[in-house]
Image (spheres, rainbow, N blue to C red):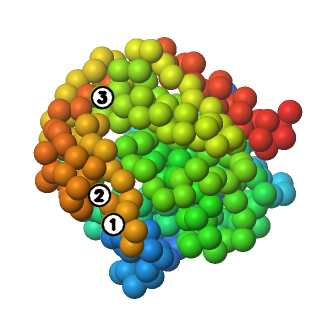
């Protein structure tokens, strides 16, 4: 009698369950949290190859798009506000394409929540080391194809995604034995001229930004692209005329607003001198975030049109690089 009652109850429960949603876009069959060792360094330590920084354990979320065979993957490097909604948007887009993703958290392991209002909390070049360290770990993962790993970064993370392409930095810090298949920096800071910054990885670099971005002006990135072009190295730049900083974050207001207290170096000219010293070119002194050129009134804002345009561009680029078509 007990068995019979259980059977009836089980049957009723099954029929009472709601139908599963048909839309599984962006879902993945497996997610892992991977940790790895890195260092916290000053920018000068990074630039001279000094490994005596503070050891730190960082982590990230690996979303595996398929469980059959090694898969292509994109490392996503967040900006000064930490992992924001745009990271989730890109994770879903990548999963829908059959591409795995690794959302790297460069802050939590260091006890940092955000650096937007105090960029001096963390050297701006640490994220480059972090993505190299993540590359070394992910390249050995059984579900990752080490020849098909791309790097995509946003703002502070976009700066990392741009300058991680420098051959000099690869030689000093990348111990993975490999390179990224593509570099996709979004609205990076291009205010700094580094020694050897025209010697780049042969992998494609495609930069995205907005014309009205007054946080990290795209004009400075276009000037860098012209310097590269003068030595025979081109990078692609896609510019969206009405887009502000963080234009791909769907949880921001869809109009520019002031990021109160956000530090911007939009009016700074920073230059690396020998021995890894970053100089404020206007004062001739070592650069600090207390310099007069640093301002506090940049704007942020979601741009639905720019976001709808950039998503298929990124998809097409990755399909080509990863040979998915």
In this rendering, does residue 79 appear at all? no
Quadrant assignment, res 96: top right
- x%, y% of residue 264? 25, 41
The quarter in which the N terminus is drawn is bottom right
Mark identifier at residue 223: none
> Which quadrant: the C terminus?
top right
Reading the image, the residue beneath label 2 is: 279
Measured in 3D between alpha carbons, the distance from the residue under mark 2 to the one under mark 1, in whole angstroms, is 6 Å
Instruction: Evaluate if marks 3 and 2 touch, with contact meaning CB atoms under 8 Å apart.
Output: no
Residue pointed to by mark 3 = 214
Mark 3 secondary-structure assignment: loop
Q: Please report the residue visible at 71 percent of the width from the left and 33 percent of the height from the top.
A: 317
Which residue matches tag 1? 277
Local packing at callout 2 (Cα closer than 10 Å; few below 14, some 14-19, many 20+) is: some
Which residue sits furthest bottom? 52
Residue 256 in the image, given as x and y percentages of width and height: 28, 21
Residue 322 in picture, x, y percent from top left? 79, 44
- Mark 1–mark 3 CB contact (< 8 Å): no
Question: Left or right: where does residue 38 sit relative to residue 278?
Answer: right
Displayed quadrant of residue 40: bottom left
Which residue is painted at 67% across and 54% down in the image?
A: 201
The numbered mark, 1 or 3, whose residue comes first in the sequence reads: 3
For disc 1, the neighbor class at 10 Å (few under 14, some 14 to 19, many from 20) is some
Mark toward the viewer: 1 or 3:
1
Work out whether residue 128 can be spotted.
yes
Q: Disc 2 vs disc 1: Cβ atoms closer than 8 Å?
A: yes
């Amino acid at each position: 009698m007990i068995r019979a009652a259980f059977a009836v109850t089980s049957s009723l429960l099954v029929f009472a369950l709601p139908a599963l949603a048909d839309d599984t876009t962006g879902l993945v069959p497996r997610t892992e949290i991977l940790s790895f060792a890195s260092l916290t360094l000053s920018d000068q330590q990074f630039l001279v190859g000094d490994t005596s920084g503070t050891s730190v354990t960082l982590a990230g979320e690996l979303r595996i798009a398929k469980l059959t065979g090694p898969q292509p993957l994109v490392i996503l490097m967040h900006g000064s506000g930490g992992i924001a909604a745009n990271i989730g948007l890109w994770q879903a887009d990548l999963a829908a394409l059959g591409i795995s993703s690794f959302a790297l958290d460069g802050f939590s392991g260091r006890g940092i929540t955000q650096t937007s209002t105090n960029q001096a909390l963390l050297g701006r070049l640490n994220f480059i080391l972090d993505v190299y360290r993540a590359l070394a770990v992910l390249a050995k993962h059984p579900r990752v194809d080490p020849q098909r790993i791309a790097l995509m970064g946003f703002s502070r993370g976009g700066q990392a995604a741009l300058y991680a392409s420098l051959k000099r930095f690869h030689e000093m810090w990348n111990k993975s034995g490999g390179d990224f298949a593509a570099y996709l920096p979004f609205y990076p800071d291009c205010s700094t001229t580094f020694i050897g910054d025209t010697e780049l990885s042969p992998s494609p670099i495609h930069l995205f930004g907005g014309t009205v971005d007054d946080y990290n002006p795209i004009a400075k990135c276009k000037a860098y692209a012209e310097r590269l072009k003068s030595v025979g190295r081109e990078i692609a730049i896609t510019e969206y005329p009405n887009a502000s900083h963080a234009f791909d974050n769907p949880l921001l207001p869809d109009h520019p607003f002031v990021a109160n207290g956000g530090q911007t170096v939009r009016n700074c000219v920073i230059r690396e001198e020998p021995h890894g010293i970053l100089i404020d070119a206007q004062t001739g002194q070592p650069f600090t975030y207390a310099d007069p050129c640093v301002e506090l009134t940049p704007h942020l804002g979601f741009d639905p049109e720019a976001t709808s345009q950039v998503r298929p561009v990124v998809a097409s680029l990755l399909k080509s690089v990863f040979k998915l078509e």
